[in-house]
Amino acid sequence: MLIRTAAAAGPFNIPLLGSWEFIKLYLCDGDMARMYERLGARYGPVVFLRVAMDTPVVAIRTNETIKASREEASKDLQLGAIGGSYLYRQMSAWHNLGLSFAEGKNWHDNRRFTINTLGKLGFTRRKIEPLVAYECAMTAQKLTEAAGQPVDSHQILPAAALNSILQLLMSRRFELDDHQVLRMRSDSVTLFSIMAKIQTYLDFAPWLNKLAGKDSVSKELDRVMDTFYEFVDQVIAEHEETFNEDEEPRDLLDAYLAARSQGRTDQDLSRANLRVLMKDLIVGGLEGPYTTLSWLLLLLAEHRDVQQRVQDELDAVVGADRTPTIEDQHACPLTLAAIDETLRYATLTPFNRHFAAAGGATLQGYHIPAGSVILVDINSLHHDPDVWGDPDVFRPDRFLGEEGARLRPPGAWLRPEPALLSGGALQSHHAVPVRGGAAAEDDAAPAGRPAAYDRRPRATRSPCNPVRPW
Ligand code: HEM
């Protein structure tokens, strides 16, 4: 009988130091997705590695294994915890606060409060529509002003993508070129790079942080989080001054203050929790929609035939005299399929935020030790040739069924803002790629994935090139 063990299905580990693959990755700023692609081809759907102090890391790489982890092993694995790494704890302000890096009851409470309140405030309904329509108009105006000159999407899209959700969170919006939002965007790049680190020396010797200079990763993290906290603290203070508990909450922040003033004790409603929650929502609300939009514009610029078909659809359904509405989505299957395909092809988050297995388990015959860091290799799921056939081709039609109807992708990953914002921008403008500072006039997209994305280990993957509108 063959007994498969953790050590059998992964590369060589140096005792105490961990896998040479990880050491190389961090020393050379390598591409984690490519590393797992290589290891997966060699070791199969579950890859075992170790980081320092022999901590096991398990990467799950196929749909079947994910399904099995839910069915066979979920009870034993007890996957609730986020992993407790030094940097993750720092991101939840050391006290398990906020949403993105909290765990257990606090995570559940903050999540439920946020989803319920945003639902009541109109996130999924019509309230978001005029907010996005306004951002569409502002973005289109910027593109018109560019008069065919290249536009760096990193300069105008962050605020356009963040503003609509920011108004529901705290009744604020930024001008598209506001320096504060541009600083947040540049700091969120750093934040997501730090988030990709599975482990640092601080996990074993936290005291070293006291000795480390200002370049230590933890101090860098404090610096970038302060950019968000500076803004959040100012808005919380203003809300506390103007909050009126007899009136309907203006936004999520008011709803939190209202819950606090009712003296509720069933969940943490402290100010400290509020500022971390707001920081997490701003970081998420900035990164998700903006990166999706940047990729969509880049891919449509690279695939002008698809862009033309999307524009024809928008012309037929929306026309030129009004902005797109949420209702229009039902009549725009190709536009939605282009967004679905962008999320698959570009894979915004190549890996989940890592979480820890509290218990040991057996998964498809492999032993997963307690304390393992579990990573879902979303990139490989999105590029599995057995599932997609031609995964490295950008082909929105894969999400269209007979007679052009949209097939829903696995999981409901579509949110309204990218459809409305990109629809608005593409109604009045075309996009072409810019290579080497000049617009590339050839229509042909390079085979495989576009070369120009930031391959350094980051928790999100972001395109580099600007596009030229015309
Ligand atoms: C196109 C839009 C968006 C996309 C594609 C997107 C994508 C994602 C993904 C893939 C994750 C899971 C990451 C992981 O587990 O490692 C996530 C989590 C999260 N996102 Fe988004 N997101 C979008 C919009 C937003 C918006 C508008 C907000 C803010 C209101 C937001 C806030 C968050 C937060 C707080 C989390 C952590 C949730 C938790 O721990 O339960 N996202 N997002």
Image: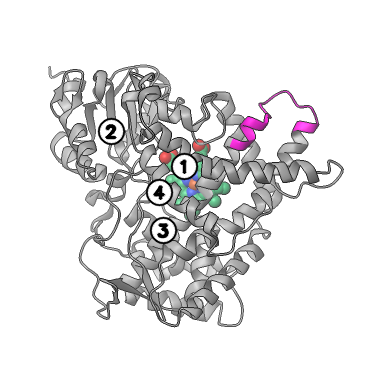
Q: From the image, state whether disc 1 or disc 2 is nearer to you.
A: 1
Q: Is residue 327 magenta?
A: no
Earlier along the polypeptide chain: callout 1 or callout 3? 1
Q: Picture coordinates of residue 159 (x, y %)?
A: 54, 60
Taking 55 as reference, is 400 left or right?
Answer: right
> In whole angstroms, how far apart are the C-alphas of marks 1 and 3?
31 Å
Earlier along the polypeptide chain: callout 4 or callout 3? 4
Q: Secondary structure at mark 2?
A: strand
- Where does the N terminus fall, quadrant-wise? top left
Q: What's the amino acid at mark 3? A: Asp
Q: Nearer the viewer, residue 272 or 38?
A: 272
Q: From the image, state whether disc 4 or disc 2 is nearer to you.
A: 4
Range of residues picked out in magenta: 260-275
* Residue 59, label in figure: 2
Which image quarter: residue 334? Answer: bottom left
Q: Secondary structure at mark 4?
A: helix
Residue in view at x 21 percent, y 68 percent = 446
Q: From the image, state whether disc 1 or disc 3 is nearer to you.
A: 1
> In whole angstroms, how far apart are the C-alphas of marks 1 and 4?
9 Å
